[in-house]
Amino acid sequence: MADKKPADEVDVTKEWRATHGQESVAKRLRIFAALAWIVAIGGEIAGIVLLRQHKFDHGNLPLLIGILVGIAIFAIAGSLLWKAANKQDPARESDHARFFFQNQLGAIITVIAFLPLLVLIFMDKDMDPKNKKIAGGLGAVLAVVATLIGVSWNPPSVEQYTQDMNKCAAEIKANQPTKDCSPEVAAQAQDIARDSKTVAEATNGQDVVYWIAPENGAKKASTPHVFHICQGVSPLRGKVVNRGTVTEAYAENATRITKQIPMEQKQCGFAAPAEAEGA
């Protein structure tokens, strides 16, 4: 692994991953979204049943309008909750099918919640023409509005969060304004900056660490590994070791900095701050 990069290149090798807290929030939001969509589709089913029973042939227009408005409200609520969940735990843009369906599910569900009922309204030969025009027209407008709200026009992705997180970390380390530090990436960016600073202080300004390589040639370890400040420390002896920046260590799931910094400084030949001042 390379230790140096051009000064103007932003390191994006650490892949952003949702934290446990973000995953929990996303799960709750998706459950609430699913419940809202179930209510919306339930409203559609109720409307279809009543339509089949000819309840709207010569009246009950307010009831039909109420059903259509209710479908729109719950479809939109579900879409907004689902979008909020995707901000906490987005899909990978490289996984094209999942990325599309995860981000556009709100629009898809909204179409499902409206289209069959609208088709039946417009095809109903027994309904009063005036009521059909009013209900069908209002339903079509509500369906279009709810669907457009359900569309994710600029959906988040793991790749985008990875870039933002590393830009954020670079800004933190350089004491620059943190314009890229959105709430979704700030925590992990701060982890990178904090650990990089600790390593630099322990190694006289270097950003080079060592960790046990992922098992069986994998790109990332299955469990979190510890990274160390040199290859000669006891835990790494006899192991296949990778070498790189703190960011590169995180990319391979070596996300835990050693707790034995003073001991490793002695093993690696780095003078502790107090010793360096007295030298």
Image (cartoon, helix red, strand yellow):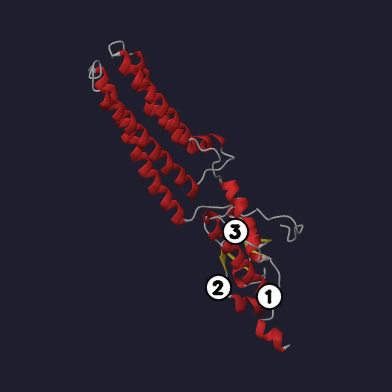
C-alpha distance separating marks 1 and 2: 15 Å
C-alpha distance separating marks 3 and 1: 22 Å
Coordinates of residue 174 in the picture (x, y in percent)? 68, 65
Can residue 239 be seen here? The reply is: no
209 or 170, nearer to the observer: 170
Mark 3 vs 2, N-terminal side = 3
Mark 1 vs 2, N-terminal side = 2
Q: What label sits on residue 259 in the rendered view?
A: 2
Coordinates of residue 216 in the picture (x, y in percent)? 59, 51
Q: Is residue 267 left or right of residue 145?
A: right
Give the residue at mark 3: 250
Q: Is residue 68 left or right of residue 179?
A: left
Quadrant where the C terminus is found in the figure: bottom right
Give the residue at mark 1: 268
Q: Amino acid at mark 1?
A: Cys
Residue appearing at x 58%, y 50% in the figure? 161
Tell me the SS state at disc 2: loop
| Circle 3 crowding by C-alpha within 10 Å: few under 14, some 14–19, many from 20 | many
Residue appearing at x 49%, y 47% in the figure? 87
Quadrant where the N terminus is found in the figure: bottom right
